[in-house]
Amino acid sequence: MLKSLEIIKREPERRERLWVIIKKMRKAFNDMGWNTLNTNSAIIPLMVGDNMKTFSMTKELGEMGVFATPVVSPAVPPDKTLIRTSYTSTHTDSQLDHVLESFEKVGKKYGVIPSGVTV
């Protein structure tokens, strides 16, 4: 823990980079039509609202090289399921763009976000 605090103090650019990433991803997801529950952290939930869609979407995202975690019932009510995404300061812009493109494709395919919106 002390080592972590030392790094935070010594390398503030990591925190600054993480906030840039958080703002970029949250804005892009919201612009696409995803409900992010107004999150303000490196963990960004994306509401799906259906167990099977959540599982299917997470599987397809994994096949696209995107790691995301399904959160389904009984952990949440069946109509409140979501896909949990998380970010670190070491994610590259290219990786983030791939995540956004993948979520846009899968979200439109499953009707979770409007198909006419493109970011």
Image (tube, rainbow, N blue to C red):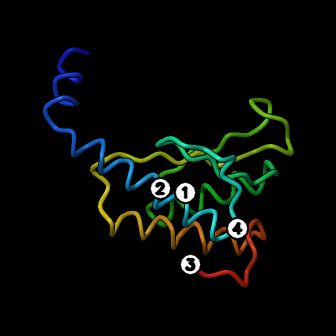
* Callout 1 touching callout 3 (CB < 8 Å): no
Label 4 is placed on what type of residue? Gly
Kindly report the distance in space between the C-alpha atoms of the residues bearing marks 2 and 1.
Answer: 5 Å
Distance of mark 2 from mark 4, alpha carbons?
Answer: 16 Å
Crowdedness near tag 3: few (<14), some (14–19) or many (≥20) residues, C-alpha within 10 Å:
few
Categorize mark 4 by other alpha carbons within 10 Å: few (<14), some (14-19), many (20+). Answer: many
Amino acid type at image mark 3: Val
Q: Which residue is mark 1?
A: 26
**In percent of the image, x 76 and y 65: which residue is there?**
112
Q: Which residue is mark 2?
A: 23
Question: Residue 23 at x, y = what percent?
Answer: 47, 56
Residue that numbered label 4 is attached to: 33
The quadrant in which the C terminus is found is bottom right
Label 2, label 3: how far apart the Cα atoms are: 15 Å
Helix, strand or loop under label 1: helix
Of badges 2 and 4, the one in the foreground is 2
Tell me the residue at 79%/35% (across/down).
Answer: 73
The Cα atoms of the two marked residues, 1 and 3, are separated by 12 Å
Mark toward the start of the polypeptide (4 vs 3): 4
User: To which residue does mark 3 refer?
Assistant: 119
**Secondary element type, mark 2:** helix
Q: Element at badge 4?
A: loop
- Marks 2 & 1, CB-CB < 8 Å contact: yes
Residue 15, percent from left and from top = 30, 41
Q: Indicate the secondary structure of the residue bearing disc 3.
A: loop
- Three-letter code for the amino acid on which mark 2 is drawn: Lys
Residue at position x 80%, y 43% from top? 80
Q: Quadrant of residue 116?
A: bottom right
Locate the N terminus by quadrant.
Answer: top left
Q: In the depicted view, which residue is nearer to us: 31 or 51?
A: 31
